[in-house]
């Protein structure tokens, strides 16, 4: 068997690379597509629920699929420095791929609202990390201005190569499943990923690799749901810090994906997100970050509303690894019990 070579090599004919493009890869992609039997039986017994575990990527999120291409293309045009605004995962991925490519990386993050693991990643990979006294949307505005001079290569999803790389996830789902799902559900923040998946599905369809297209369904956090509300949210709030965004860059593309596919976009509450987050860990053995669980919380909501057709195949993308956000994990779980180091004390605690 040929070992996996990363998304650019595996999906080369669908991507804008040539023999001259220097490929910067950490062998991203090929993430598990796992059948969620126990949780599925509980929340949506009428369908087959599968989880695309993107936390299994090299830096622990789906961002790596887009970053491999964005950084390869940056290197191709002799860029020296990368820059992004981020709620955490983009900065972790940019820092890692930038390190691999030998490029300087500058990341702007919202002060105090980025999960600890993600901050640690950006710092460890040697990026220059700038905390701004503001939110993601403000950081992105600054980054766009700074990158317009051409000195820094913008690696947010406004960079078209990011979405090109991320579309490979849709193709991978079809390859793993032997066809497209009926419905694909994703958390929505800056709205790039849902747009990228739709592009991937459409290109696979056009290439004759699949015979029909899935419905694209997105979920935003209730306190950070500009697309659902139809207006910019000035001060977005949610426990799912990855999707704490009030003015998504790919707003129009996401709406297009939903409309063209006959899908929908709705909100889930922080409480619903946290229930799905702990259920995934406790019942499926999958530790994802809170934002990722918005997809499964959404499936629960669709199922309760009777909106999941009998026999459908539903894929949820779990966008990032749970270890990214240890604070929320510890806060959402039972604390360890402390006893003296004797067998008697442990036995007494266990009631045996
Ligand atoms: N899930 C996670 C774990 C994310 O990190 C993000 C976005 C999303 C979902 C939403 O995806 O933005 O394409 O709609 N994180 C970006 C970042 C904004 O900076 O890491 P989207």
Image (spheres, rainbow, N blue to C red):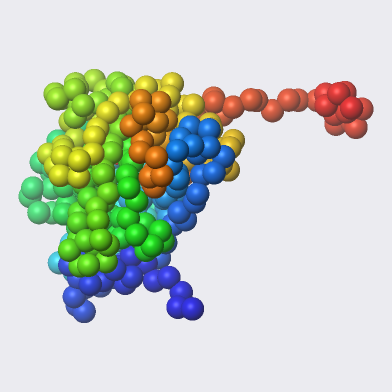
- Reply above or below: 8 against 57: below
Quarter of the figure with residue 209: bottom left
Q: Residue at x 43, y 70 (%)?
A: 4
Q: Residue at x 28, y 38 (%)?
A: 217
- Reply above or below: 244 against 285: above
Q: Residue 135: x percent and y percent?
A: 25, 28
Q: Residue at x 33, y 65 (%)?
A: 7
Question: Which residue, as the protein is rendered here, is positioned at the far left?
Answer: 149
Count up the numbered dots. Answer: 0
- Reply above or below: 78 against 122: below
Q: Between 344 and 253, which is closer to the camera in this rendering?
A: 253
Left or right: 37 as drawn, with respect to 258: right
Q: Residue at x 41, y 44 (%)?
A: 311
Q: Between 135 and 128, which is closer to the camera in this rendering?
A: 135
Q: Residue 255: x percent and y percent?
A: 16, 38
Q: Residue 162: x percent and y percent?
A: 23, 54
- Reply above or below: 162 against 320: below
Left or right: 245 as drawn, with respect to 249: right
Quarter of the figure with residue 169: bottom left
Q: Between 84 and 317, which is closer to the camera in this rendering?
A: 317
């Amino acid at each position: 068997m040929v070992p996996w070579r990363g998304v650019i090599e595996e999906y080369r004919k669908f991507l804008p690379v040539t023999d001259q493009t220097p490929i910067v890869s950490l062998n991203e992609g090929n993430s598990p597509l796992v059948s969620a039997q126990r949780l599925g039986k509980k929340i949506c017994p009428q369908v087959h629920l599968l989880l695309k575990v993107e936390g299994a990527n090299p830096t622990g999120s789906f961002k790596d699929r887009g970053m491999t291409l964005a950084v390869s293309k940056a290197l191709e045009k002799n860029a020296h420095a990368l820059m992004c605004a981020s709620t955490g995962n983009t900065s972790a991925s940019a820092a890692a791929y930038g390190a691999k490519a030998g490029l300087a990386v500058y990341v702007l993050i919202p002060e105090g609202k980025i999960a600890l693991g993600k901050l640690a990643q950006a710092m460890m990979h040697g990026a220059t990390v700038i905390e701004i006294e503001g939110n993601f949307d403000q950081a992105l505005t600054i980054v766009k201005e700074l990158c317009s001079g051409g000195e820094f290569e913008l690696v947010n999803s406004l960079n078209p190569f990011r979405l090109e790389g991320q579309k490979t996830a849709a193709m991978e789902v079809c390859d793993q499943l032997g066809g497209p799902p009926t419905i694909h559900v994703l958390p929505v923040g800056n709205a790039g990923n849902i747009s990228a998946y739709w592009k991937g599905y459409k290109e696979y369809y056009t290439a004759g690799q699949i015979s029909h297209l899935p419905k694209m369904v997105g979920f935003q956090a209730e306190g950070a749901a500009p697309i659902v509300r139809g207006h910019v949210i000035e001060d977005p709030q949610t426990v799912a810090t990855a999707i704490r965004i009030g003015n998504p860059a790919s707003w129009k593309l996401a709406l297009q994906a939903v409309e063209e596919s006959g899908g929908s976009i709705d909100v889930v509450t922080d409480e619903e997100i946290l229930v799905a987050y702990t259920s995934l860990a406790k019942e499926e053995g999958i530790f994802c970050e809170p934002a990722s669980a918005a997809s499964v919380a959404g499936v629960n909501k669709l199922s309760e509303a009777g909106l999941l057709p009998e026999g459908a195949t539903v894929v949820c993308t779990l966008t990032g690894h749970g270890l990214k956000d240890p604070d929320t994990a510890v806060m959402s779980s039972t604390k360890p019990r402390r006893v003296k180091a004797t067998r008697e004390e442990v036995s007494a605690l266990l009631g045996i």
